[in-house]
Image (spheres, coloured by chain):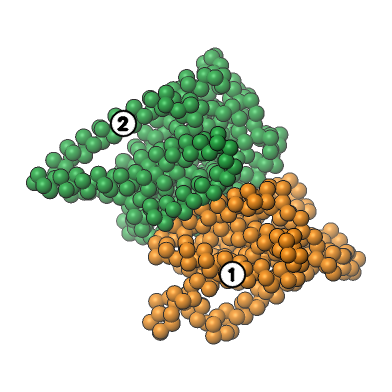
Chain colours: A orange, B green
């Protein structure tokens, strides 16, 4: 039972990274119709930026949690304006390939600059201890990651569902033609939404920095698991991304805890099952197939 | 996926099919191309270091297998390393444990790749376009995990070492890559011919119809998913031949063969060469392999920066690829010439 709780918290923390990053992927896909292969590299850049800020400017975790997403937003806007926007009218595959190329470049640039061994990043002060929950002790940082990611996902969902801006973005993403006909300037929203999605990936990276090794290749496996997540959740769905993100985090943690060696395979087994039962994903709309 | 691939793909019934002059011009062009290809295939190990020549041949066939799906069925497989890698491991293990001549081991590897392609393809063809790419990628990664963990069989992170190159009792050691090339290239050409046959068969016509308009093809009574699945498995088999040749040539199989960057690299070759042309893949493969070789020998350690940039530029500015662009120019020139004459 204690082990089970331990794995659950671990899974929810890992799920937090996944949910945040998958949410960014889903928002970008919704607004631009772009499947962003570079999302893993943006996650990695978030973590690396946090590590560099700490090293060079002595900016600590809490400040990074705000500064890095802003920097990543700016970076995302630049990427969108320089590269992505030129292919928006073409087949979706082109942007997939473009962002794949971009991720190769980003990973190798970081590798050349900081080597392969990775950058150190310590646990933020105040979160390095253990929290007692009944009979089990849980690392405070894992609990924090879970709660923080959940809160951010909730806020994003509320903004999309309840505010005027969210309504416009949803209209622009779900019915671009009709939104245009109603006088909404759809293209004006595309660039900031891309930047926002990149910022979410970067935020997930900052959260990962004290927890996982900060290396140039940390996003490589991550992005593939993200793809499995969006296939499970349904690519068009924001809710699907978040739920599937946490679900995959849990599956991974239980797998590592109980199944051992072949645990990573479980995620893809889950994906296979979902494809067989509901090809559009758990929360996907049918026409999105 | 809507097909906006912008690549000149032979349509089924071109008006020029019924124009004897155009037909003759086309068959002359085909013969010329065949001669050029033959000279390239035979002369390659004279021009480049023989092991690199084998690499080019293997990657060329691998790119052809990807183009068979991408260019002719409209399916971007981003997990083709699974078949290349599974065949590489299987061929390596067969050669190591059974002592059979290496072409037999390679064929065995290709069969293993096709077997593994059946369940993956079955699931993947349920989704199209970008979803297909993500599903194939994810399953390929699953195989990577298995190979990484299954130490006893695959050697895990150390890879599979000491794969022999026995050819009916003759051991072709490293220095004899020159001779190995000529045996291996027969398999490569066989694979390429198979792809060409598939594309130019009634079956291939149905594939192109599926690419252009899946719903209409379904309405005509074709079982679209089954056609896609068969094409997927055949493509996996061709990728398997390529992977087997690569493994035997290097005498070593590493996890890199299953890595997603390998899947990406072969797609880059296909796009760079020109998708939907079959000829483009080998050209893209030659360019990338030679470039990587040049960069590696010059001690440059950021190959991803170069290949990634090529990818970006290619997709932004040069979507027809090398062969697509060349073919387009030739077509235009021929048309202009015919117009002036006629």
Callout count = 2
Q: Chain of mark 1?
A: A
SS of the residue at dot 1?
helix
Secondary structure category for the residue under label 2: helix
Q: Which residue corresponds to mark 2?
A: B36
The x and y percentages for residue A42 are 60, 61
Q: Position of residue B76 (x, y in %)?
A: 46, 51
Asked if labels 1 and 2 share a chain, the reply is no
> Where, quadrant-wise, is the N terminus of chain B in this rendering?
bottom left
Residue drawn 74% across and 67% down? A59
In the displayed image of the protein, which residue is found farthest to the front? A57
- Quarter-wise, where is residue A249 in the image? bottom right
- List x then y, in percent, for residue B176: 52, 19
Which residue carries the number 1 mark?
A73
Residue drawn at point x = 38 percent, y = 53 percent: B319
- Measured in 3D between alpha carbons, the distance from the residue under mark 1 to the one under mark 2, in whole angstroms, is 51 Å
């Amino acid at each position: 039972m204690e082990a089970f709780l331990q794995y659950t918290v671990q899974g929810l923390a890992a799920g937090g990274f996944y949910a945040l990053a998958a949410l960014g992927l889903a928002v970008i896909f919704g607004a631009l119709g772009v499947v962003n292969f570079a999302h893993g590299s943006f996650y990695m850049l978030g973590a690396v930026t946090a590590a560099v800020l700490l090293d060079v400017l002595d900016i600590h975790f809490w400040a990074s949690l705000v500064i890095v997403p802003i920097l990543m937003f700016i970076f995302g806007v630049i990427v969108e304006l320089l590269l992505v926007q030129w292919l928006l009218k073409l087949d979706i595959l082109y942007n997939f390939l473009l962002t794949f190329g971009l991720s190769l470049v980003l990973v190798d640039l970081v590798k050349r600059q900081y080597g392969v061994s990775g950058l150190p990043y310590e646990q933020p002060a105040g979160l390095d201890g253990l929290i007692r929950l009944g009979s089990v002790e849980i690392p405070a940082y894992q609990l924090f990651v879970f709660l923080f990611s959940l809160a951010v996902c909730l806020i994003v969902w509320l903004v999309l569902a309840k505010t005027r801006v969210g309504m416009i973005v949803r209209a622009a993403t779900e019915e671009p033609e009709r939104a245009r006909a109603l006088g909404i300037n759809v293209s004006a929203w595309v660039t900031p939404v891309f930047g926002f999605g990149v910022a979410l990936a970067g935020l997930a990276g900052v959260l990962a920095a004290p927890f996982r090794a900060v290396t140039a290749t940390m996003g490589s496996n991550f992005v593939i698991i993200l793809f499995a997540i969006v296939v499970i959740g349904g690519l068009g769905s924001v809710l699907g991304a978040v739920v599937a993100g946490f679900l995959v985090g849990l599956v991974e943690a239980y797998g590592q805890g109980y199944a051992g060696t072949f645990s990573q395979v479980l995620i893809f087994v889950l994906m296979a099952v979902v494809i067989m039962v509901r090809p559009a994903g758990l929360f996907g709309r049918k026409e999105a197939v | 996926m809507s097909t906006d691939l912008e690549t000149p793909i032979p349509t089924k019934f071109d008006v020029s099919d019924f124009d004897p002059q155009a037909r003759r011009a086309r068959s002359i062009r085909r013969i010329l191309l065949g001669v050029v290809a033959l000279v390239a295939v035979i002369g390659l190990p004279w021009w480049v270091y023989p092991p690199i020549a084998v690499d080019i041949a293997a990657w060329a066939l691998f790119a052809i297998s990807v183009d068979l799906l991408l260019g002719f069925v409209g399916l971007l497989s981003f997990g083709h390393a699974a078949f290349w890698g599974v065949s590489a491991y299987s061929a390596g293990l067969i050669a190591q444990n059974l002592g059979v001549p290496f072409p037999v081991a390679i064929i065995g590897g290709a069969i293993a790749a096709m077997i593994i392609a059946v369940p993956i393809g079955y699931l993947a063809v349920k989704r199209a376009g970008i979803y297909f790419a993500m599903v194939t990628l994810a399953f390929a990664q699953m195989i990577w995990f298995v190979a990484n963990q299954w130490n006893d069989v695959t050697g895990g992170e150390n890879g599979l070492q000491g794969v022999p190159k026995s050819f009916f009792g003759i051991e072709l050691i490293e220095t004899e890559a020159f001779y190995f090339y000529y045996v291996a290239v027969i398999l490569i050409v066989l694979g390429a011919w198979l792809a060409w046959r598939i594309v130019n068969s009634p079956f291939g016509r149905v594939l192109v119809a599926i690419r252009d308009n899946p719903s209409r093809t379904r309405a005509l009574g074709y079982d679209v998913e089954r056609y896609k699945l068969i094409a997927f498995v055949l493509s996996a088999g061709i990728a398997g031949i390529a992977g087997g040749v690569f493994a035997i040539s290097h005498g070593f199989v590493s996890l890199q063969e299953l890595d997603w960057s390998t899947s990406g690299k072969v797609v880059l070759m296909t796009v760079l060469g020109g998708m939907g042309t079959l000829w483009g893949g080998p050209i893209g493969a030659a360019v990338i392999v030679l470039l990587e070789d040049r960069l590696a020998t010059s001690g440059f350690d950021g190959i991803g920066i170069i290949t990634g940039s090529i990818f970006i530029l290619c997709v932004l500015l040069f979507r027809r690829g090398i062969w697509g662009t060349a073919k387009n120019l030739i077509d235009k020139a021929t048309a202009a010439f015919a117009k002036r004459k006629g």
